[in-house]
Amino acid sequence: MQAQTSPMNPRSHAAEAASSEFLTFRLGQESYGIEILKVQEIRGYEVPTAIANAPAFIKGVINLRGVIVPILDLRIKFHLSEARYDDFTVAIILNVAGRVVGVVVDSVSDVLTLASDAIRPTPEFASAAFDTKYITGLGTVDDQMIILLDIEKLMTGADMALVDGAVH
């Protein structure tokens, strides 16, 4: 429900613009967030059809109501510990850059509204081996750190061009 500006509700449009909603999810011990407007739906994990010669993080494709959707495992993409699939594993179906893509995560946590002052810039690291270009910032809620991803930049990156090549 969207807040409206009125004498009864002093919340201004500027205050609304200063906060953003994120779908939060877990990968291992860490919490991540993506812009809620990019999320199309959340589904239970189903084993996708494998695509030959695809990178390890591309698990395959699923048929979602007639649309062939590539499924990527973010745990593998981010070089985290071994991916395991259980009852909590879900696929978040995203609509980014005009295409539908699914990402596998350990579990979905919540939808959070973060005010701009609750989001800190991504720290800079001296090592070129650590790439932060897909991180838009770090959100904090009740002493919990949430890594905010630029899911559009991640999904349209050069290595993701392999998704289109593998599917078409």
Image: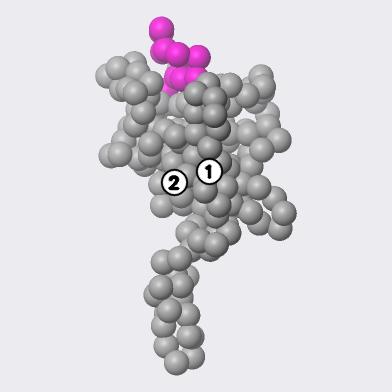
Q: Residue furthest bottom?
A: 7
Judge whether 145 appears above or below 125 on screen. Answer: below
Q: Which residues are magenta?
A: 50-61
Residue 142 appears left or right of 47: right
Amino acid type at image mark 1 = Thr
Q: Residue at x 46, y 72 (%)?
A: 15
* Residue bearing the label numbered 2: 39
Cβ–Cβ below 8 Å for labels 1 and 2?
no
Spatial distance from mark 1 to mark 2, Cα to Cα?
A: 23 Å
Residue 107 screen position, x and y as percent? 63, 39
Q: Residues within 10 Å of mark 1 (few under 14, many from 20)?
A: some
Magenta stretch, overall SS = loop
Mark 2: which amino acid?
Val
Mark found first going from the N terminus, 1 or 2: 2
- Label 1 residue SS: loop
Screen quadrant of the C terminus: top left
- Crowding around mark 2 (Cα neighbors within 10 Å: few <14, some 14 to 19, many 20+) is some
Q: Is residue 51 above or below residue 70?
A: above
Marker disc for residue 122: 1
- In the image, farthest residue toward the front: 126
Which residue is at a point 41% across and 83% down the rendered structure image?
5
Could you say which is closer to the camera, residue 44 or residue 118? 118
Residue 70 percent across, percent down from the top left? 40, 26
Front-most of residues 46 and 97:
97
Residue drawn at x 58%, y 26% is 75
Instruction: Please indicate whether residue 137 sits to the left or right of residue 83 in the image.
Output: left
- Is residue 9 shown to the viewer in this render? yes
Q: Is residue 76 above or below residue 38?
A: above
Work out which residue is located at the far top of the displayed protein and give it.
53
Q: Secondary structure at mark 2?
A: strand
